[in-house]
Image: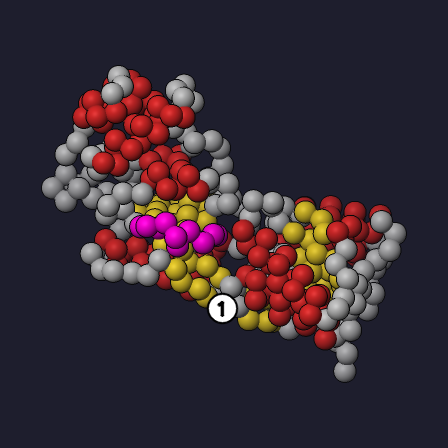
Amino acid sequence: MATIKDVAKLAGVAVSTASYALNGTKKISDSTKQKVITAAKELNYQKNGYAMDLKMNKTKIIALILSDLIGPFYSELIQGVQEVVMEHGYDLIVCSSYGDESSTAAKFLREKRADGVILFAHNIETQLIQDSVRKGFPIVVLDRDLSDYEDIISVNVNNEHGSYIAAKYLIDQGSKNIAFVSGPKKSIDSQLRLEGFKRALKEHNLPYYSKWNINGKFTKDGGYQATKMLIHQGQLPDAVFYANDEMAIGGIEALKENHIDIPNQVSVIGFDDIQLAPYIQPPLTTVKQPKYEMGKLSSHLIFQVLEGEDVQNFYSLETEMIIRDSVQRSF
């Protein structure tokens, strides 16, 4: 097995420099870092982050890296992952991707701290994921399409179509002026949901207003603040499409505070169908995405790769409209 000395020798740098490069610190230039990473990949070097079964060279750990550990969306996803991981006698470690390239999440990618990684984090750069690819180390990404890159598996929900059917449902119920509350700018999910929203408007010859596209950061408070901004603009839309349910719940709170009736004055629709969605008032009309199934498929693919089986580079799961009472219906 290659050592860090072997990597340093092949890259033509000092051992300390090689260590800095592999730990993701910013004490060296990008060109030097890339030389070290290339040498490590060529030698199939793997840093031992945790004690492992040396005979099998396995940690018996799967890592699930999320953008955030707060929020109701992740519970079903984690459950799906955990069930498969436990069936195989492995442990699951869930961590946040908050921080820079020396964060715990980045170390799970760069170092041999797990036997496979499932990544659902828009703030992890594609380059870091590419640099972490190595033989026998499966990486599954859930929030973006990296199927063009060898040895990276993409499992995506059809966000564009899900958003399209949600916007079309609003239009079919009579809404003509519709606002869109988006997620973080780097979120591929949010971008695709905006694309589906725009497509539905265009097909029905309805205007898209940039003033009514406000970033709600995928959080309840973000949705609340974005909705207050809509209200302060003075002209309310017929409907608001929130790119996730947490923002929709915050938006409903802001509308109620301003005595705006839902759905008679403004219709509200979300995306995700989190567990709380049926229980708020009014119950939230939304787009259900298969969170549990996504987690289960992702972990199943990890173990297929670990067992030497061939898998596809891209998988797509479909969404479903869930109709409740937050959208005014045209009977």
**Front residue of this view, candidates 104 and 83:** 104
Judged from the image, the secondary structure of the residue bearing numbered disc 1 is loop
Please name the amino acid that badge 1 sits on.
Glu
Q: Residue at x 77, y 55 (%)?
A: 209
Please indicate, yes or no, whether residue 188 appears anywhere in the rendered image.
Answer: yes
Above-or-below relation of 276 to 93: below
- Report the residue at 41% width, 19% height from top: 27
Q: Which residue is mark 1?
A: 318
Instruction: Count neighbours of disc 1 (C-alpha within 10 A) and say few if under 14, some if 14 to 19, many if 20 or more.
Output: few
Question: What residue is shown at x 31% (from left), y 28% (from top)?
Answer: 35
Q: Is residue 198 left or right of residue 68?
A: right
Report whether residue 282 is seen.
no
| Residue 168 percent coordinates (x, y) | 67, 71
Q: Position of residue 66 (x, y in %)?
A: 46, 46
Q: Which span of residues is magenta-colored?
A: 143-152
User: Relative to the observer, which residue lies in front, 72 or 167?
Assistant: 167
Placement of 256 over or under 206, stated as above or below: above
Can you say whether 72 is above or below 106 in the image? below
In the picture, measured across the screen, residue 96 lies left or right of residue 297, that is right
Quadrant of res 86: bottom left
